[in-house]
Amino acid sequence: MKEKEKIKEYWEERAKQHMENPSATTDDVYLRELEISVIIKTINEIGIDKGSLLDVGCGDGYSILKVAEAFKNLSFVAIDYSENMIRLARQRLESQPDLKHQARFIIGDVTAIGQSLCGSSFDIVLTDRCLINLGSFEDQCNAIRNIANHTKKNGYYIAIENFIEGHENMNAARRQLGLLEIPVRWHNIYFKEKEFIECAGRFFQDISFREFTSSYYFATRVIYAAMCQMRGEKPDYRHEIHQLSIRLPWIGQFSPIRMAVMRKDG
Ligand SMILES: C[S@@+](CC[C@H](N)C(=O)[O-])C[C@H]1O[C@@H](n2cnc3c(N)ncnc32)[C@H](O)[C@@H]1O
């Protein structure tokens, strides 16, 4: 099986195993709550509360439907290449009749996004841990170009993606406490900040980063992980430390996951 098909199969299988459980797209369910709250905060800061939002790589729709609940005057289109994920997302939408006219879930691949979107463009485009699943930096950069092609002038791209620099800082802190490094998973390629800026900067302006998971990762992947090692316990994603750490102020750069916000030239 080719790498791309293997990665797609991974997401198809995850959708089958987790079903309507909110852990279909990450085991770290509090991280997901943190992402949702920061997406909502960022949309409020951008000041676009009417218009349209495209979520690329929406998974089971859990996050984007929470965002839709917060913005009644935005319409949402969400795509994912996994048919099983889109099936779960549509089921989730069925169970929330108040959002039925506000959101639509479509099967679509970010590497050929035009086929599913037929020329539509959006005020805001979002990716949340989607582009890290593409097989090379070249594919990731082409995907950013595709996203720009579907972003309206003066519209915004909000990218929550993984970067190697924060990942290395986290691993350096882990080493100091005698913990093993966390490897990049087989189906992910993390961005390098300089390359990301160089690529996204061809299509977007005013790129700024938000280290919104740094304190969360420091608390959970460094301190809590070391405490578990001392006690001979297995870390638990639902532990109170995860629950509390989403409320910490954002300090440092100790996490691979960060948000980049950028505007398309008017
Ligand atoms: C880590 S999950 C995140 C899902 C969702 N954004 C969230 O935050 O819960 C990554 C998602 O990206 C999707 N994905 C990966 N590569 C894709 C591609 N080339 N086109 C569309 N979706 C893709 C996967 O199927 C999966 O649902």
Image (cartoon, rainbow, N blue to C red):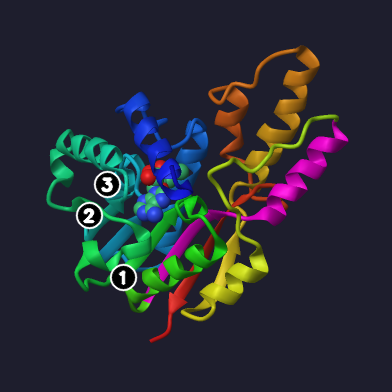
Q: Is residue 183 left or right of residue 150?
A: right
Percent across and percent down for residue 258 are 58, 54
Q: In percent of the image, x 85 and y 32: which residue is there?
A: 177
Q: Which mark is residue 123?
A: 1
Farthest-out residue, bottom: 266
What residue sits right under mark 3 in the picture?
69
Circle 1 Cα neighbour tier, 10 Å, few/some/many (<14 / 14–19 / ≥20):
many
What residue type is disc 3 on? Glu
Q: Based on the displayed image, in which of its 4 quarters is residue 246 positioned?
A: top right
Secondary element under disc 1, as helix, strand or loop, is strand
Secondary element under disc 2, as helix, strand or loop, is loop
Sequence-first disc among 1 and 3: 3
Please check the rendered image and state whether residue 230 is part of the magenta-colored stretch, yes or no: no
Percent across and percent down for residue 22 are 38, 31
Sequence-first disc among 1 and 2: 2
What residue sits right under mark 2 in the picture?
72
